[in-house]
Amino acid sequence: MVLSAAMTTSSFSGRSETAQLTILGSGTSTGVPMVGCSCPVCLSNDPKDNRTRCSALITFRDLNILIDTSSDLRSQALREKIARIDAVLFTHAHADHVNGIDDLRGFHFIHHEVIPCFVPKPAFDDLLSRFSYVFREKPGSGYPPLLKPFLVDGVVEIEEVQIVPVPLRHGKGVSTGYRIGDICYLTDCNGIPAASEKLLKGVRVVIIDGLRWSPHPSHFSIETAIAAAAGLAPERIVLTHITHEVSHADAVKLPGGVELAYDGMKFGIDLQLREMR
C-alpha cells in the first residue's frame, strides 16, 4: 500500500473513477433508540430511525477506508459485510467515534496486518494515551499492535486516493472533516472556518452534522447545518449525527436538496486520480 499524510504536489492523471461512501452510522453519541427512552422515535418501527453511532466507509476498488471506529463498529461491519479494513481516518477523539477501536482485532486475526491510521494533531496524544495497547505491544503481553498511527498534517494519500482534511469547530474544541473527491464528510461540528470553506469549493454532496431541531453548543442544529452547507452550493445536503428528537419521517419538512442520513446510505464519489510513481 502506498500512503502518506503530508502536503503533496502530486499531479493528477486526468482519469476519473467512481468510489463509494457508505454511512455506517448516522446517530449521535447515545445512538437511537437511546437506552431507557420510550419516546416515539425510540419506539419507531421505521428501520431508518434505528441509528448506530456515527462513522463512514470509503470503498475504492478493493480498498476499504474507515472514518472513525464508532462504538458500534462491530455491528456495522457485520451488517455491511466488511471483510477487511485497509486504513482508518479519525475525525476527533470523542468516545462515540473511537471506542469501537478494539473491534479491529477481528480483522487482525484474519489478515495479520497492522492497519495504518491517520489522526489529526488535536486528537493524536489523546488517542494514543487512551488506547496505547492498540498502537504498541506492551512487553510480555503477547498482544500485537492493531494500528500504526500517522499524524495528519496535510492531504492524506492512500493508493491513488487523495483525502483532504478539513478543520472544523466543535464547541470549545475542534474536529476534522474530510473531502473525498466531490463529497465531504463533516461530522461533529458547529462551525466551518473560512479557510476550510475554500477546501470545499465545488463539492457535490455535503454530509454534515445536523444534530436536532433545537440548538446545541457543540453541534449544528438542522437549521444551522443547512445554512452552513448551503453556502457551499452543493447538489445535495445530507444531515447526520442525528438524535432521537428527529424522526426520519420529518424529512418531509426539509427544503429541496436536503435529506436525513440513515444507516447503510450509499453515495457514489467521483475521484480524480493522482499519478502513481
Image: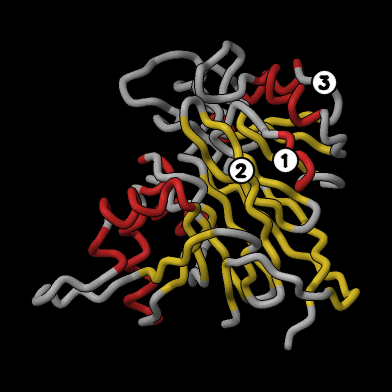
Residue wearing tag 3: 255
Question: Horizontal placement of 270 versus 249: left or right?
Answer: right
Mark 3 nearby-residue class (10 Å; few <14, some 14–19, many ≥20): few
Q: Tell me the amino acid under the disc marked 2.
A: Pro
Along the line of sight, which residue is nearer the eye, 229 or 44?
229
Q: Secondary structure at mark 1?
A: helix
Kindly tell me whether residue 204 is visible in this rendering: no
Which of discs 2 and 3 lies nearer the camera? The answer is 2
Along the line of sight, which residue is nearer the eye, 268 or 140?
140
The N terminus sits in image quarter: bottom right
Q: Secondary structure at mark 3?
A: loop
Which of discs 1 and 2 lies nearer the camera? The answer is 1
Q: Which residue lies at the image location 65% right of the left edge and 77% below the top edge?
A: 159
* Mark 3–mark 1 CB contact (< 8 Å): no
Q: Tell me the amino acid under the disc marked 3.
A: Pro
Question: Horizontal placement of 16 versus 220: left or right?
Answer: right
Rendered image: mark on residue 167 = 2
Residue wearing tag 1: 195
